[in-house]
Image (cartoon, grey):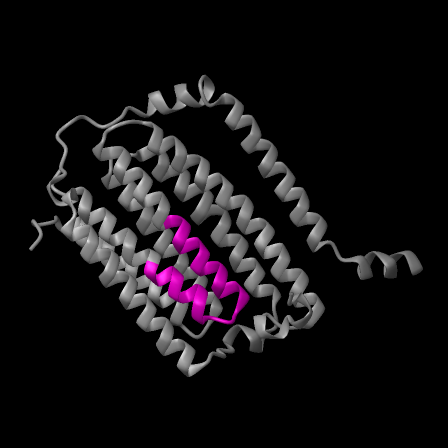
Amino acid sequence: MSNGLIDFVLVSVALLAIGIYGLSVKRNAIRMLFGVEMIINSANLNLVAFARFIPNSQGQTLALFSIAIAAAEVAVGLALVIVAYRMYKNIDIEDFRSLKG
Amino acid sequence: MLHMVDAVFLALSVLTIGSAIVALEIRSLIYGSIALMLTLSGIAGFFLLLDAPFVAMFQLSVYVGSIAVLILFTVMLVRRELIFNKIEDKRRRYAGIGLMLALMLGIGMIIIGSGMKSMETNSPSVDYKKIGEDFLTYYSPALIVMALILASSVIGALTLARREDMTNEQRAN
């Protein structure tokens, strides 16, 4: 294998930074979910990369669990977005006033 | 600075990072979700490079097959002008870009300076039969709990998204 561990970890860091940027700057609820997805995927990439280079199989197992849990999280998150859209007729999170505190 | 990476890796990282930026920055949410689909496929490609074909196929079927389609349908449910609406604070945006670059440079420098650079492997990859065996023996309680979590979250999502007004109207008729 010609690629070292560090290459995969650097890609994962870049994806994590982009996800944090999206989560902190965007006000569109669906775009914030995009950011969350990117962060989860960078974590999964780290898990599989370290599992390859150690090497053992538990990293891949944990990545599989993580992907499944992320699917559940997205289903609930999108349902919440739909409910909020129905209540406020908008997906801008600044409009979700009554969700504050 | 670093050793050479092969062309496939380079193309995959450009695809993944580029479409991640496009997914956040493009005006239309529909194109944004398609770009997110590309990012997730790029991650599946990395899994293939890492000799984890089982995880790669799982990623393709779960993320690209179901989650991205779910996001696309949700985007199509909201009003048309909201899909193309892009509201954000200029100052907040510059602060966010600064944060992103600081994170990339900071963590990247730490990682490049660490001992990870010399880590390469010649050992054979893990057989995916081993993973399936683990799932059915050692991790079987965790697998059951995960199935329950998935079922309850899907039921929760259905309960949340149910339309009360629609059923009341139908009852009135």
Q: In which quarter of the image is the C terminus of chain B?
A: bottom right
Residue B49 in sight? yes
Q: Does the magenta stretch include residue B69?
A: no
Q: Between A72 and B11, which is closer to the camera in this rendering?
A: A72
* Residue plotted at (46% across, 81% down): B89
Q: In which quarter of the image is the N terminus of chain B?
A: bottom left
Name the residue furthest bottom.
B90
Q: In this view, does A19 lie to the left or right of A8?
A: right
Residue B170 is situated, as x and y percent measured from the top left of the image, at 87, 58
Q: Is residue A86 left or right of residue B124?
A: right
Residue B35: tell me if it is visible: no
The residue lying at 24 percent from left, 60 percent from top is: B106
Residue placed furthest toward the top = B137
| Number of numbered discs visible in the structure rendering | 0
Residue at (40% x, 82% y) in the render: B91
Q: In this view, does A35 lie to the left or right of B170?
A: left
Left or right side of A75 for B34: left
Q: Which of B96 and B165 is in front in this view?
A: B96
In the image, is residue A66 above or below residue B167? Answer: above
Q: Is residue B61 above or below residue B141?
A: below
Q: Give residue A17's quadrant in the image.
A: bottom left
Q: Main secondary structure of the magenta part?
A: helix
Q: Which residue lies furthest to the right in this view?
A: B172
Q: What stretch is highlighted in magenta?
A: A17-41
| Residue A21 within the segment the image draws in magenta | yes
- Residue B106 in the image: above or below residue A26: above
Residue that appears at 33% across and 39% down: A47
Q: Residue B5 appears at what percent x and percent y?
A: 12, 49
Q: Nearer the viewer, residue A96 or B49?
A: A96
Image position, residue B145 (x, y; %): 57, 30
